[in-house]
Image (spheres, grey):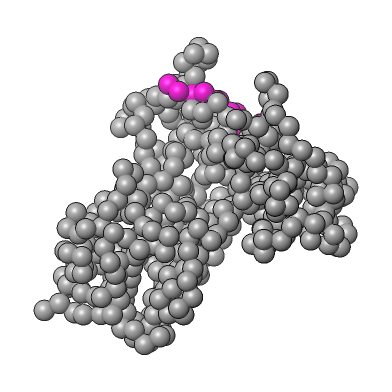
Amino acid sequence: MPQHFDAIVIGTGQAGPFLAVKLAGAGRKVAVIERGRFGGTCVNTGCIPTKTMVASARTAYVARQAARFGVTVGGRIGVDMKQVKARKDEISGASRTGVEKLLAGAPNCTVFRAHARFLSDREVRAGDVVLTADQIFINVGARAAIPPISGLDQVPYLTNSSMMNIDFLPAHLIIVGGSFIGLEFGQMYRRFGSQVTILERAPRLIEREDLDVSEAARGILENEEIGIRLNADCIGLAPVPGGVEARANCESGKEAIRGSHVLLATGRRPNTDDLGLENTGIQRDEHGYVQVDDELRTSVPGVWALGDCNGRGAFTHTSYNDYEIVAANLLANDRRRVSDRIPAHAIYIDPPLGRAGATEAEVRRSGRPVLIGKRLMTHVARAVEKGETQGFIKILVDAESRQIAGAAIFGTGGDEAIHCILDVMYAKAPYTVLERAMHIHPTVSELIPTVLGELKPLEAPARSGGAER
């Protein structure tokens, strides 16, 4: 006999648990189904563990640079990878346990530790139990995409998830993919002491970003002696004694690269292929993402999809915002929509990139008159004082509405300072509100009003450089 609930939440990433607790607190009878570890990607293999390791890697890097600051460190700087992993596991584990306790302690909430599979639009099997509900929320996340690389079936390889299990230092880590995951792991392991080579099929790193961002990221990584191979169209892998050989960059005729380990960092794919969605009317796109409307409703009334599996964002903050949108619409009669949010993200190489709104390439394509302000971090006192002068601040303003269209702060503190700009964008205030603000000295944020005071019309890029069209 099926067990009936008011709501079923499938998956416990950064949307599902909070929505379940919110619904249960409102008196709804809620079932939560989780087949693996609580907390999803962010808690277990994403943000929390990787940024914990980034912190360890930065500590090693800063220690090696101590003499530049007049600080003497005795002896050789070493990295204990077992201890690095233990610290990461402790912090990640505490977060995972916190999510599990949150759900276990919520009234009106029943947790099923099982694989969920739809039997129909309103029926879900959880192990040996069949559940029904008037409302169902899918929050199953995504996993590493495995590209069709020649020879991949002949060599062992790592993904962002399996990297969390190693407690040793790869001698030479070959990374396939030059975007968020590849760059963060590349710099991290170089700072731990590995030799690192990044292979990217595109003509530049993080191709979704502006050209100046890509070039700055390349410079940062190459300054730390990370090898970068672009236009690596012909990627093939083969086993060799003691490791793996990667063949790439066929046009250049360069020799194959030999390494000890290979990490695949070539994107993500949604965990929607084993949910039994073929038994429902829930539609997916050609990549497997559940199709949703502006309020995250699927093609089946009473079913929503939140987080990475809906293709409307690939970050913890977008997943959590999905929860806020659905909860507000269902429980507070406060209509909220995905289209209300402003795109924003960070890339956690060191120094980090903070991005909000449109890129320079996107505003160029809009055809609207745009103003631009830009300042190198070498002209930011706080960056000079810290000895971290790589990067720049760039702000784009719509010349007609006088509202900020987008910004990038690539440099020390950029992941935090970008929120000064993001909040003004949400307020839909003219840029002059921020330009006339008095910021604290010495900070990175104090240069934002200065940059806004130096706006100039955005000119067409030169043929040999500038932002891409």
Q: Is residue 70 highlighted in magenta?
A: no
* Span highlighted in magenta in the image: 222-234
Q: Is residue 223 highlighted in magenta?
A: yes
Quarter of image, res 87: bottom right
**Where residue 246 sits in the image (x, y, percent)?**
44, 25
Q: Is residue 281 left or right of residue 305?
A: left
> Which residue is at 62% across, 37% downward?
367
Q: Residue furthest left?
A: 1
Quarter of image, res 303: bottom left
| Residue 387 visible, this orientation | no
> Which residue is at 46% across, 47% downward?
160
Quarter of image, res 442: bottom right
**Where residue 362 sits in the image (x, y, percent)?**
59, 40
**Where residue 451 sits in the image (x, y, percent)?**
81, 48
> Which residue is at 80% across, 44% downward?
455
| Residue 128 visible, this orientation | yes
Q: Residue furthest front?
A: 400
Decide which of 1, 387 is in the foreground and name it: 1
Q: Quadrant of the N terminus?
A: bottom left
> Which residue is at 61% across, 50% downward?
357
**Where residue 130 sits in the image (x, y, percent)?**
17, 72
Task: Count the marks.
Answer: 0
Type of secondary structure dominating the magenta stretch:
loop
